[in-house]
Image: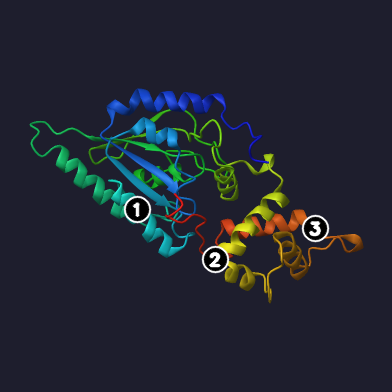
Amino acid sequence: MIENINWYPGHMKKTRELIQENLKMVDLVVEVIDARIPSSSRNPIIDQLVGDKKRIIVLNKSDLADAEENKAWSEFFKQEGNMVLAMNCMSGQGANQLIRLLEKIRDEKNKDAARKKPLRMMIVGIPNVGKSSLINRLTGKKSAKTGNKPGVTRGKQWLNLGNDMQLLDTPGILWPKFEDPNVGLNLAFCGAIKDEILDIATLCLELIKVLQVRYPEMLMERYKLTELGETALDTMELIAKKRGFILSGGRIDYERTGKTVIDEFRSATIGHITLEQVEPY
């Protein structure tokens, strides 16, 4: 399902070139990732491009993720030498903490300088992780376009924060192919791949497979199940029957069931879920 997706269009190639061209002009990189899939939402191309440049990793959508896993991933990234913040860029949770950190880095940069220079940073990340929401929080206005579909941001934008800081926004960049099909599934679960090119019922089935192992109690509680099915398909059908998603002739409405489960996962209605643990990273 995932392997056949053509998801490396021309603008993503241009984004890679854009990052390469402008990296030498910035003091640090702010990499935004999805706290629910910290490994899958980190593009290895960005890792290669950024190299040893000073980096802040923003675990965005941390309010939707498992709090204990947020702590574990934060510690992991810190041990790799990064600065890390768990945030909700949409609501602004963690924004003041980020600004204080940036101001500290700016002041350190200008400590012995005769003429103060602005702190210049680059915002990077794959589509739909919340880069535009973060930028709007930092600038206090809608400087960047936001949307709930991947691929909204286009082109290069230098934005002034008004406190001796400047940031460069870049469009979301994905990578040419999946080395691990689970990465593609995780990205699809969280909306980084357009839903229109995926079968929602099949995607739901794959998500239930994961949740049955990782968060079985949440799944049972949300859909009022006394037990899970022997297979993910059995569980999906139990959910459909509980919700009354039945078509004429008693047939299961797999599409409606799929859309419901995917939507409720993405909104954390099922619960605060992280699909990846630190160990397998």
Name which residue type carries label 1. Phe
Element carrying mark 2? loop
**Residue at position x 29%, y 51% from top?**
79
**Quadrant where the image shows the N terminus:** top right
Furthest toward the bottom, the residue is 226
Cα separation, mark 1 vs mark 3, equals 42 Å
Element carrying mark 3? loop
Is residue 158 shown to the viewer in this render?
Answer: no
Residue 232 percent location from the top left of the image:
70, 60
Name which residue type carries label 3. Asp
Q: Earlier in the sequence, mark 3 or mark 2?
A: 3
CB under 8 Å between discs 1 and 3: no
Per the image, the residue denoted by label 2 is 271
Is residue 164 shown to the viewer in this render?
Answer: yes
Q: Is residue 256 left or right of residue 119?
A: right
Q: Nearer the viewer, residue 80 or 221?
A: 80
Q: Is residue 159 above or below residue 139?
A: above
Residue 276 percent location from the top left of the image:
49, 54
Residue 209 percent location from the top left of the image:
64, 58
Cα separation, mark 2 vs mark 1, equals 23 Å
Q: Is residue 274 left or right of residue 139?
A: right
**Residue at position x 62%, y 73% from top?**
221
Label 1: how many Cα within 10 Å (few below 14, some 14–19, many 20+): some
Per the image, the residue denoted by label 1 is 76
Cα separation, mark 3 vs mark 2, equals 24 Å
Label 2: how many Cα within 10 Å (few below 14, some 14–19, many 20+): some
**Residue at position x 74%, y 59% from top?**
233
Q: Earlier in the sequence, mark 1 or mark 3?
A: 1
Per the image, the residue denoted by label 3 is 253
**Residue at position x 78%, y 63% from top?**
245
Q: Is residue 42 above or below residue 7?
A: below
